[in-house]
Amino acid sequence: MEIIDVISKTKDFNIILKEAQKGSLSKSILLISKDNLYSFDMARLIASIILNNGEFIDNENYLRVVANSHPDLKIYPQKDKLLVSDSEEIVFESYASPIQGDKKVFIIKDFDNSMESAQNKLLKLLEEPPKNVFIILTCTNINLVLPTIRSRCNKFELGKINENVIKDFLKGEENEQLILSLCDGYLGRAEKLSKIKNLTSIFQSTISVLTKMSSSKDVLFYAKDLINNSQYFDLIMEILSIALEDIIAIKNNIPILRLPQIKDEFIKIKDNYTMKAICELQKVFDKAVKEKFYNVNRTTILENMLLNILEVKFICK
């Protein structure tokens, strides 16, 4: 099953579809979700509805939108983040006539990564789009979207996907249970995880840092595995944070865990981590994420992080 087929069956999509069918769909839309892959695919489905005059039809318009090849669909940014030059191009293109039909759609993904100046350039366009022009923005963190932009858009907060729906999507996947644990109800994340061939190995290596690493002699051994998978840095940090959440839950006799499959391992080591240690470890992880943002060498980040984990365990006994 394709991810876009799953999205078409969600409650979020059907709410938006009904608005389109009533002719009340806003011309400036802001989709908010922690799952940027999901929100982008949702934006493409909305575009297909708009270009099919309010109907969700599996026709040429739909197929060309899904393939990102529809002449009246423009997707930005063309690089990592929206620049002022992109915004100026969008404004210019919005006044050009559609090529195939009578409507044009602009999708601007990860809008919260945009420069403030680039956002400002779109204020007037979002407030009064030209006739038959629709603009769909996606974002992860709405606080990074200018308030003046937010006020001009019809906002849709996209929820998590039911676990059974994700199970159907993952049917036949070797790492289904692990993916379900890590994706936290986010369909795009589930799809991304399903494409990582050595997911189980990365997971086990990362968890071992907390459950088995006990001395500075171990650092080089555990660092080697993490460094070999440093392209999955964000996943490694996510696993460590989830593990801390589960250790806290176990220490407080809370039965709901994100990683129930390794509950016994966490029970064995829970007394090695005081609540003070857990708080300090989260600071260590936050520091590592911040260093990665500032382009510090990932090998250096991971080696320092492992040493800091040992230090915290020793100081906070």
Image (cartoon, rainbow, N blue to C red):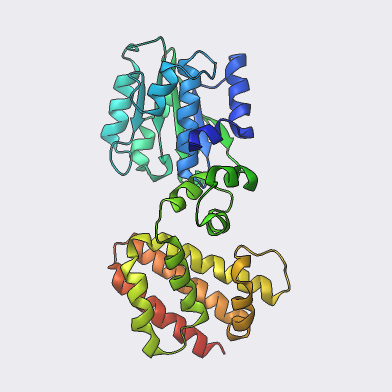
Relative vertical location of residue 220 with respect to residue 263 in this rendering, above or below:
below
Q: Report x, y in % for residue 48.
A: 46, 22
Given the current orientation, which residue lies at the most extreme front position?
172
Task: Look at the image and tell me in which quarter the C terminus lies.
Answer: bottom right
Is residue 201 visible in the rendered image? The answer is yes
Q: Is residue 268 left or right of residue 124?
A: right
Relative vertical location of residue 42 with respect to residue 294 in this rendering, above or below:
above
Badge count: 0
Relative vertical location of residue 116 with respect to residue 268 in this rendering, above or below:
above
Q: Report x, y in % for residue 277.
A: 55, 81
Q: Is residue 38 left or right of residue 165?
A: left
Q: Residue at x 55, y 65 (%)?
A: 242
Q: Residue at x 49, y 27 (%)?
A: 45
- Residue in front for this viewpoint, 261 or 88: 261
- Residue in front for this viewpoint, 261 or 146: 261
Q: Quadrant of residue 199?
A: bottom left
Relative vertical location of residue 71 with respect to residue 152 in this rendering, above or below:
above
Is residue 149 visible in the rendered image? The answer is no
Q: Residue at x 40, y 30 (%)?
A: 107
Q: Report x, y in % for residue 14.
A: 62, 27
Q: Report x, y in % for residue 19.
A: 61, 21
Q: Residue at x 45, y 36 (%)?
A: 40
